[in-house]
Amino acid sequence: MGAKSDIFIVLAALCVACSPSHLAEVAVANALSSTGDTFSSDDDPQLIAAATPFALKTMESLLADLPTYERLLRALTGDFAGYTYAFVQQEADETEAKDPDRAAAERLRARKLFLRARGYGLRGLDVAHAGLGEALLAGSSADRKAALAVAVPKDVPLMYWTGAAWALAISDGKDQVKLIGQLPAVADLMERALALDPDWDGGTLQEFFVSFDAARDRPKDALAHYQRALALDHGTRLGVKVAYAEGVLVPKQDRAGFVKLLTEVAAFDVDAPAARKDRLANVIAQRRARWLLSRVDDLFV
């Protein structure tokens, strides 16, 4: 932990009223909550897939003693959602054609994990603004919008990961009427985040709305978000291109455009200096692009 651990040792010496074990837990929580940059640039997705569950369970153990630590709740929300999408959801999708029963089991697992992430996100939003998480989950449209009015730009990361996990859970639960009925809450949450900081994280919110607006049959809006995302990330993030190909070009039955775009994604140099920080996400996007290309005859008439 380096400098971080030194800081907490000094604090422990200066503040005799503080519990040393509590300070140690906060130090570990902060260290685990800061692994995103290290993981995102890693060149071995299998290593990350194997390492992440241990980190997640450790953070959950820490949360038992730090139940209102917002930084830890945000990390759990994002890490559960990211891990599930990259290593559980994709496995379910790729398995569907050859082993439907296994795919169904993996999809059920993915839905449960996405809802777990959503739960941590709603808790974090309640910590930041009392009643916000509860209003999103159980309130009326007016209640949700009134509660979201207090959100500020620093809330956007937690809002994004909560909404992304929630939307993915709904996607995996198309037979769950109650869950599908929560889609307007996702829309309210993410639209408020977009209004607060439309260019957050180099276009991550824009990328979300490429898929979300495509699913809502708003291809023109999806295209606008796609173009904005490309401008923000300078073409170095591949996920938004995969999202556009899958969400917009397939419904349009633009086979040529689909093949061209995903072939470019598959051939992209993920070790290019400008893209190095997003290497893991880009490798995962390339995996999905190659899988989609393998299904081109099934996706296009």
Image (cartoon, helix red, strand yellow):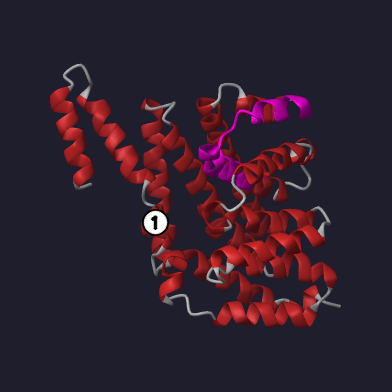
Nearer the observer, 3 or 176: 3
* Residue situated furthest left in the rendering: 13
Point out residue 89 in the picture as x, y percentages from the top left corner: 61, 57
Q: Residue at x 62, y 62 (%)?
A: 229
Residue 12 sits above or below residue 100 on the image: above
Q: Nearer the viewer, residue 301 or 38?
A: 38
Give residue 224's position: percent from left, percent from top. 73, 61
Helix, strand or loop for disc 1: helix
Q: Main secondary structure of the magenta part?
A: helix
**Total count of labels:** 1
**Residue indicated by mark 1:** 37
Return the x and y of residue 134 as percentages of the image width and height: 64, 25
Q: Residue at x 76, y 55 (%)?
A: 213
Kindly give the residue lying farthest to the top in the view shown.
Answer: 17
Give the side of residue 264 with respect to residue 191, left or right: left
Residue 267 versus residue 133 in the image, above or below: below
Q: Amino acid at mark 1?
A: Asp
Q: Quarter holding the C terminus? A: bottom right
Residue 157 percent coordinates (x, y)? 53, 44
User: Which residue appears at 51% of the width and 46% of the height?
Assistant: 78
202 and 8: which is toward the camera: 202
Quick check: can you spot residue 140? no
User: In the image, is residue 98 part of the stretch drawn in magenta?
Assistant: no
Q: Quadrant of residue 32?
A: top left
Using the image, determine if residue 4 lies above or below residue 216.
above
Asked whether 143 falls inside the magenta stretch, the response is yes
Judged left or right of residue 142, residue 49 is: left
- In this view, the residue in front, 84 or 125, is 125
**Residue sticking out furthest to the right:** 301
Tell me what residue is drawn at x 57 percent, y 68 percent.
285
Residue 155 in view of the camera: yes
Query: Which residues fall within the magenta stretch?
Result: 141-166
